[in-house]
Image (cartoon, helix red, strand yellow):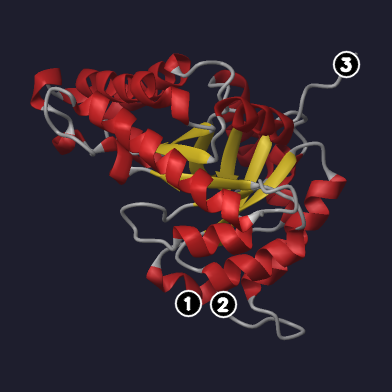
């Protein structure tokens, strides 16, 4: 039997075909959905699907955030499913769910997010250790993106605490991710915020060419240029540059989707301009 193409390979194929490192985070806020779409879960679904339609040409992948769908109540998972189905099949989709649990609970998450809703990759929390991630890491053809150094101001409260040997905890996580990527069938990546370029460089030095999901681009004010200069791998790739609000809410009127498409194209081009000089 032929092995499935890995998540990392499919992502790289999409990046080359779209000429893009841009990932759009789908974080729908019901109060920001244009009034022309109505209200409730149906309006959120329409909003997200219109965003996908207007931006898909410019992206390497999408990243729906589970919390923004579960806030809709019982209809939220159906909306998430509708949005996932609306994304063209050649574009990888990362579910930002930050799961991390043990035993049957972890296996249930893996069955739900991979088998039932067919996400290409998920974000996970490593706090409970390797056995809590094994049901995800064992999935050939899928991606497992591990929380390492997050973009929020308080991330250092835990992630920068020194551990044995003097390294901060986030570098210990990076070392584990390197080992897991080599030991398991899934493609293992890491989350490192664009708000921390120095820490990003330290992580890149530890993990080689592995994928790094880079949140904090756009509305969070992350250092895009600094992050690209230190975060690209040896092939001038390996970064998933994630922006949400700056694209989703680029416009609020009847042409919100067109405004989102223009914002996505502009950010894709800005990333590529920096990327060209960073790898020159």
Quarter of the image where one finds residue 137 = top right
CB-based contact (under 8 Å), mark 1 and mark 3? no
Q: CA distance from mark 1 to mark 3?
A: 45 Å
Mark closer to the observer (1, 3): 3
- Labels 2 and 3: the sequence-earlier one: 3
Mark 2, residues whose alpha carbon is within 10 Å: few (<14), some, or many (≥20)? some
Where is 191 relative to 90, above or below?
below
User: Would you say 249 lies left or right of 107 here?
Assistant: left
Using the image as rendered, state which of residue 5 and residue 67 is in the foreground: 5
Asked if residue 150 shows in the view, the reply is no
Using the image as rendered, state which of residue 153 and residue 98 is in the foreground: 153
Residue highlighted by disc 3: 2
Quarter of the image where one finds residue 247 = top left
Query: What residue is rendered at 64% in x and 30% in y?
Result: 16
Residue highlighted by disc 1: 157
Residue farthest to the right, as pictured: 1
- Labels 1 and 3: the sequence-earlier one: 3
Mark 3, residues whose alpha carbon is within 10 Å: few (<14), some, or many (≥20)? few
Disc count in the image?
3
Q: Residue 160 has which mark? A: 2
Asked if residue 9 shows in the view, the reply is yes
Residue 128's x, y, as percent?
64, 58
């Amino acid at each position: 039997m032929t092995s499935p193409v890995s998540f990392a390979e499919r992502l790289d194929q999409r990046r080359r075909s779209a000429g893009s490192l841009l990932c759009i985070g789908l974080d729908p806020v019901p109060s920001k959905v244009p009034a022309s779409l109505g209200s409730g879960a149906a309006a959120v679904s329409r909003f997200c699907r219109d965003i996908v339609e207007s931006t898909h040409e410019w992206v390497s992948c999408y990243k729906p955030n589970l919390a923004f769908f579960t806030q809709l109540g019982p209809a939220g998972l159906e909306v998430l499913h509708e949005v996932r189905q609306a994304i063209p099949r050649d574009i990888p989709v990362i579910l930002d769910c930050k799961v991390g649990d043990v035993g049957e609970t972890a296996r249930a998450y893996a069955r739900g997010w991979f088998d039932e809703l067919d996400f290409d990759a998920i974000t996970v929390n490593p706090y409970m250790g390797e056995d809590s991630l094994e049901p995800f890491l064992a999935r050939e053809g899928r991606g497992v993106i591990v929380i390492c150094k997050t973009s929020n101001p308080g991330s250092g409260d835990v992630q920068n605490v020194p551990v044995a040997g003097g390294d901060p905890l986030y570098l210990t996580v990076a070392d584990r991710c390197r080992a897991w990527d080599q030991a398991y069938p899934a493609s293992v990546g890491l989350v490192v915020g664009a708000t921390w370029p120095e820490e990003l460089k330290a992580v890149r030095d530890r993990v080689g060419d592995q994928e790094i999901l880079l949140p904090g681009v756009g509305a969070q004010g992350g250092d895009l240029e600094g992050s690209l200069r230190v975060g690209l791998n040896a092939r001038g790739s390996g970064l998933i540059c994630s922006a949400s609000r700056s694209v989703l809410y680029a416009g609020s009127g009847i042409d919100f989707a067109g405004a989102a498409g223009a914002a996505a194209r502009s950010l894709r081009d800005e990333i590529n301009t920096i990327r060209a000089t960073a790898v020159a």
